[in-house]
Image (spheres, coloured by chain):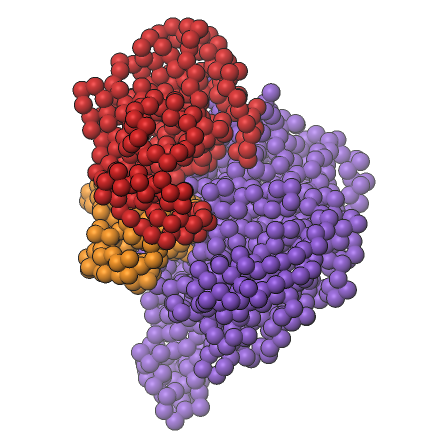
């Protein structure tokens, strides 16, 4: 059971940031992971009063407030239209609707969790994270940064002409994934992110141009093999490194050949 | 700290510890329908509707409910009564411990999607665990209710 | 079969508590007990085998709000068992409330009683314990005759002789047979011989273990607990605390599921001890984690089987040896193992010439196992049905045909089932019915769906018992109210199964009234007539018959009272649809007159109590068939359809019987595909909450369809047998069969995970 001495609903990002500089203070997101801990928090800093729970769509981008829930994104028409329902597919198996009505995109990203479906999907997009002090950083860079005392304010997804798809493997339907993958094509480049390895997602680009714009089965297999070789996998109770490597090959091949990915 | 919220239509005001969870607050206020089935946000037994959305009250700080509107099954008896007979006819209530969370989330589903398909029902309720029924009877009950609303034979 | 038409029995009536449950009314232990009871928390051991050399609680006791902390030094020194079983218990007396010798990770070391949870948890961190850590035996396969003894103590005591020996780590052992199994096996054309491994599974009932205790207005210990066994609880508490049984009252409110978990007094002794020590109300609520690390899960078993047959598919001999892991304590160890042979082998009584069943039940330094729906039969049936499926695949005979050739049929004697005769058996009809409903011929062949996916099917049969023969006692009291209604008082425990409603239906049938006229009360040791409790698939069959008997007795009594009113001999009165009729004149006396008569200048009471016990335990039978889609590249198994046909005699309430079946199948699916309790190197449990121990969601069970074949059990109420447990037995062998069909690999260890499947193919 987590212990919290004080709760403050921040009135400004600056106030939240100031408070967050103390080690024993903490920004709270969806509270789903935080409340399971047994630690002590001096001040819980809540961003819920700062209007960060909205998603704006402009002609060129989606701007997603850090406190937007996963459920909002899962059911967001614009995002799903743009990603060919990869958002719905990536989020719909995360525990349950009631969970996803609490879990925030900012909280999900901040933890840089290994099992994260959110991170895997966003890595495959043209996506950046806006930090209060750190400014706008590409998602891949954000993922590799060590957690500091900054605050995620927004997520920005650039609308680029391309295609997007997502798949995962779960043993029980709403469990953590054994592996998840997102594949995208934009700026004349295929990209593939692999997560739940069980370590956090990594992005592999098709820099050797193995894939054509419409990949053949052979190309898909060859690329999937390359990714599976490049990426490191680990073992946990849900699967061995060897099994994850196999899954990566299978899921990526299928995504590239239009089998079993996200669709409406 | 002091919070004020609307619980089942009534304004309540309470001095709370900052780490009090919403589930414990509402149970303290007599809303015993809200159950704790796990500590890991996995079971759905503690589902309440906050600002119109179903959420896990085990993972909401009571402090965060300040100024919000919360409904538990105690406050939605009439809405629940519209369909629970159909669940009862299947015997799918069983031990009953998961029922309040299941009923609350079914209410949320039907508000959001008044005519769901079987797959949509399964998907929306997938976060509501039940160890007794095997789920099929709950689905039959909801299906029969939806059919009865359309005036179909059941 | 000719079907008798009853008015109330056989009807799908909603459960009597349905509205209360579905509307979320406060009906469970934590809802109905005072909020200001002492919070009881347990400090648990991080070691699997250790002796507490020093325990300091003085600092912890100073935490504001802490009322007291108890250690091994404070508790009575008499050993007892917490298994809910009829006296003399087959389970050894091997427990203390707190033992200095710790035998599994998670065993309680101290009991903390505090005004609130925060204080209790704070105190828990401040208790200082020094352990002498001992070598532990964690692999049950190495436990028998190990130099590490789980129970070296001299006061280990078995109330029954069940082949146990604590100096050999044996909780029980035994052997029985019929015919010369070795001779028959050596004469068989083919022998299937393998070892099958089933794991410990958690019941994962939605309401964890919890108990409230207080001293009542007479200073007696009043216990409100989520339990299936109020009377056994009373005895267990009396043994544990050393207080007389008449000074204890145990009652259960609504129970949030049990599945056998609450057939063991897992949580009761701790708050009871606190209340006796402090005189104050006390409450313990197990966290989900505690429910997992110190609950009462299924016994892990390793079953070695030799099944001999001829090339024409005649199954001639079964030799079955079970090694069962009872864990740190022996609850239900000696009895669960029996079902692994006695409720699997008899299914082939149609052709078996000989059988042998032998077993060892060993202690180990893992959490103690207990009772879980299926109770050993599930494990044995996985082995036997898997072997029969393998036989049929090897011989190229359709697995449904091979079963029809060998199965037990009505009227047959079952030598491996204590020589009982299958007086009601529709197993053959279940198989034909299921085959047709499922479209077996169409689904059995392996079909390539493209993209690495195949569809195919598997099949299994199952049996169970109905109560424990020569042991279980069910009782019922029926009382007439002044307006012609009735109160039915029972000691059986409705844990969501609907037995309150089912028993009321039987009473209504007997008394010729509507089921709404029957109110049900129970279970409460002060008020209920003695009942063993709800376990071993006994309630419908045993307590149901007691209800029938009590109603017959009551009708006679009401006639006698009617005769007093009419001034005639009792033989001239007859009970008829809510009235008593004077046969010679046709004069009818309303029940309200009879009830009021008993309340005024009367020596008669308009109530009756009856008990029932049975020398037999008639098996229900079942056939389950599953269609899966298996992804050969990822190993993922998707269940398309699970269909089953059950012979539970007469389903007293078909809706409730169907839900029992569907729920049991869903649990079985979970056990087969992903549920698992496994241990770290130090003996700690890995899957200790619902984040890691995954039970099926509604997306994981496919479409379930259950139908019934009726048989008429002559010793059961209205021809009924049981339904509660058998329904969990078919998924493991049926799924393993389908997975073999899809991959060519037999999986003999549960759970069969996608990884095992995928790498099995390579």
Across and down, in percent, residue C542 comes to: 54, 64
Q: Is residue C220 above or below residue B2?
A: below
C604 vs B69, nearest the viewer? B69
User: From where the camera sits, is residue C749 visible?
Assistant: yes
User: From where the camera sits, is residue C360 visible?
Assistant: no
A239 vs C408, nearest the viewer? A239
> Toward which corner of the image does residue C676 lie, by quadrant?
top right
**Going by the image, does C276 lie left or right of C519?**
right
Residue shown at the point (48%, 83%) measured from the top left: C218
Chain for colour orange: B
Across and down, in percent, residue C231 comes to: 55, 70
Residue shown at the point (41%, 27%) measured from the top left: A145
Residue shown at the point (50%, 29%) measured from the top left: A198
Residue shown at the point (23%, 43%) measured from the top left: A11
B66 vs B95, nearest the viewer? B66
Chain for colour purple: C
A102 vs C407, nearest the viewer? A102
Across and down, in percent, residue B77 comes to: 24, 57
Q: Is residue C555 above or below residue A145?
A: below
Image quadrant containing the C terminus of chain C: top right
Q: Is residue A160 above or below residue A70?
A: above
Across and down, in percent, residue C76 comes to: 65, 71
Q: How many discs mark residues in the rendered view? A: 0
Chain for colour red: A
């Amino acid at each position: 059971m987590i212990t919290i001495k004080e709760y403050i609903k921040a009135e400004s990002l600056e106030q939240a940031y100031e408070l967050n500089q103390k080690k024993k203070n903490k920004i709270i997101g969806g509270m789903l992971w935080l409340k399971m801990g047994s630690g002590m928090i001096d001040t819980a800093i809540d961003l819920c009063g700062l209007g960060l729970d909205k998603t704006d769509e402009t002609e060129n981008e989606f701007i997603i407030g850090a406190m937007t829930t996963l459920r909002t994104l899962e059911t967001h028409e614009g995002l799903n239209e743009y990603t060919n329902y990869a958002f719905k597919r990536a989020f719909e198996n995360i525990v349950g609707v009631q969970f996803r009505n609490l879990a925030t995109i900012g909280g999900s990203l901040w933890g840089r969790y290994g099992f994260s479906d959110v991170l895997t999907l966003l890595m495959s997009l043209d996506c950046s994270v806006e930090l209060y002090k750190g400014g706008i950083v590409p998602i891949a860079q954000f993922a590799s940064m060590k957690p500091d005392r900054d605050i995620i304010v927004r997520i920005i997804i650039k609308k680029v002409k391309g295609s997007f798809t997502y798949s995962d493997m779960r043993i029980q339907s709403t469990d953590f994934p054994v592996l998840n993958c997102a594949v995208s094509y934009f700026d004349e480049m295929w990209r593939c992110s692999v997560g739940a390895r069980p370590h956090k997602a990594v992005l592999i680009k098709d820099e050797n141009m193995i894939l054509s714009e419409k990949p053949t089965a052979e190309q898909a297999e060859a690329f999937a093999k390359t990714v599976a070789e490049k990426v490191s996998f680990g073992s946990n109770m849900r699967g061995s490194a060897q099994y994850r490597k196999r899954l990566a090959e299978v899921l990526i091949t299928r995504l590239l050949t239009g089998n079993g990915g996200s669709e409406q | 700290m002091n919070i004020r919220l609307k619980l089942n239509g009534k304004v309540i005001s309470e001095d709370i510890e900052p780490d009090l969870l919403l589930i414990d607050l509402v149970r303290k206020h007599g809303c015993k329908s809200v159950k704790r089935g796990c500590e890991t946000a996995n079971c759905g037994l503690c589902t309440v509707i906050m600002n119109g959305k179903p959420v896990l009250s085990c993972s909401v700080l009571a402090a965060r409910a300040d100024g919000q509107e919360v409904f538990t099954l105690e406050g939605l008896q009439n809405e629940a009564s519209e369909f629970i007979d159909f669940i009862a006819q299947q015997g799918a209530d069983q031990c009953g411990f998961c029922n309040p969370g299941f009923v609350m989330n079914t209410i949320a589903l039907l508000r959001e999607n008044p005519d769901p398909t079987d797959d949509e029902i399964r998907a929306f309720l997938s976060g509501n665990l039940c160890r007794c029924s095997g789920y099929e009877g709950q689905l039959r009950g909801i299906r029969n209710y939806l059919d009865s609303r359309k005036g179909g034979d059941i | 079969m000719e079907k008798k038409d009853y008015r109330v029995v056989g009807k799908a009536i909603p459960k009597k508590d349905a509205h209360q449950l579905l509307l979320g009314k406060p009906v469970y232990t934590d809802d109905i007990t005072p909020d200001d009871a002492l919070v009881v928390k347990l400090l648990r051991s991080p070691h699997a085998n250790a002796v507490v050399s020093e325990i300091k609680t003085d600092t912890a006791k100073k935490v504001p709000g802490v009322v007291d902390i108890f250690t091994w030094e404070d508790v009575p020194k008499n050993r007892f068992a917490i298994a809910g079983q009829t006296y003399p218990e087959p389970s050894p007396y091997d427990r203390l409330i707190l033992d200095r010798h710790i035998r599994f990770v998670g065993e309680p070391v101290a009991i903390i009683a505090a005004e609130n949870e925060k204080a209790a948890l704070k105190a828990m961190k401040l208790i200082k314990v020094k352990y002498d850590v001992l070598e532990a035996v964690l692999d049950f396969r190495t436990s028998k005759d190990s130099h590490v003894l789980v129970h070296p103590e001299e006061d280990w005591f078995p109330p029954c002789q069940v082949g146990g020996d604590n100096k050999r780590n044996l909780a029980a052992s035994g052997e029985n047979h019929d015919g010369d199994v070795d001779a028959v096996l050596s004469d068989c054309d083919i022998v299937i011989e393998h070892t099958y491994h089933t794991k410990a599974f958690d019941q994962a009932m939605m309401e964890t273990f919890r108990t409230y205790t207080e001293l009542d207005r007479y200073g007696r210990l009043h216990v409100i607990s989520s339990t299936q066994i109020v009377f056994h609880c009373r005895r267990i508490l009396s043994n544990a605390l050393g207080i007389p049984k008449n000074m204890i009252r145990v009652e259960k409110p609504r129970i949030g599921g049990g599945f056998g978990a609450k057939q063991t007094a897992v949580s009761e002794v701790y708050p009871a001890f606190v209340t006796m020590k402090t005189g104050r109300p006390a409450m313990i609520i197990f966290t989900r984690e505690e429910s997992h690390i110190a609950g009462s899960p299924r016994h892990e078993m390793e079953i070695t089987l030799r099944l001999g047959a001829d090339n024409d598919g005649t199954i001639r001999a079964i030799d079955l040896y079970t090694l069962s892991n009872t864990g740190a304590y022996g609850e239900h160890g000696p009895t669960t193992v029996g079902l692994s042979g006695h409720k699997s082998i008899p299914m082939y009584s149609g052709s078996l010439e000989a059988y042998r069943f032998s077993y060892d039940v060993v202690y180990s330094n893992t959490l103690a196992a207990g009772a879980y729906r299926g109770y050993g039969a599930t494990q044995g049936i996985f082995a036997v049905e898997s072997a029969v499926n393998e036989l049929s695949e090897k011989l190229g005979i359709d697995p449904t045909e091979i079963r029809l050739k060998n199965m037990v049929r009505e009227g047959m004697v079952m030598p491996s089932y204590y020589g009982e005769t299958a007086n009601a058996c529709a197993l053959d009809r279940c198989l034909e019915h299921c085959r047709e409903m499922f479209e077996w011929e169409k689904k059995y062949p392996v079909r390539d769906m493209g993209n690495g996916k195949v569809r195919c099917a598997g099949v299994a049969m199952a049996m169970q018992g109905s109560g424990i023969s020569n042991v279980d006692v069910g009782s019922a009291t029926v009382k007439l109210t002044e307006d012609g209604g009735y109160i039915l008082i029972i000691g059986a425990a409705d844990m969501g199964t609907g037995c309150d409603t089912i028993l009321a239906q039987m009473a209504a049938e007997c008394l010729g009234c509507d089921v709404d006229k029957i109110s049900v009360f129970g279970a409460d040791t002060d008020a209920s007539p003695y009942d063993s409790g709800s376990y071993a698939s006994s309630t419908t069959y045993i307590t149901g018959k007691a209800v029938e008997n009590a109603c017959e007795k009551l009708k006679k009594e009401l006639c006698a009272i009617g005769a007093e009113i009419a001034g005639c001999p009792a033989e001239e009165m007859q009970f008829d649809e809510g009235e008593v009729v004077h046969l010679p004149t046709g004069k009818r006396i309303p029940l309200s007159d009879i009830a009021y008569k008993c309340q005024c200048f009367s020596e008669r009471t308009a109530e009756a109590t009856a008990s029932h016990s049975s020398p037999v335990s008639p098996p229900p039978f079942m056939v389950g068939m599953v269609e899966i889609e298996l992804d050969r590249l990822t190993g993922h198994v998707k269940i398309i359809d699970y269909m089953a046909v059950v012979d539970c005699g007469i389903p007293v309430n078909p809706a409730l019987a169907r839900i029992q079946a569907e729920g049991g199948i869903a649990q079985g699916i979970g056990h087969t595909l992903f549920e698992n309790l496994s241990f770290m190197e130090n003996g700690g449990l890995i899957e200790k909450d619902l984040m890691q121990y995954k039970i099926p969601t509604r997306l994981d069970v496919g479409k379930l369809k259950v139908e019934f074949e009726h048989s008429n059990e002559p010793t059961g109420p209205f021809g009924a047998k049981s339904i509660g447990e058998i329904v969990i037995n078919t998924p493991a062998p049926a799924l393993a069969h389908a997975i073999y069909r899809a991959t060519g690999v037999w999986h003999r260890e549960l759970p069969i995970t996608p990884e095992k499947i995928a790498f099995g193919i390579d």
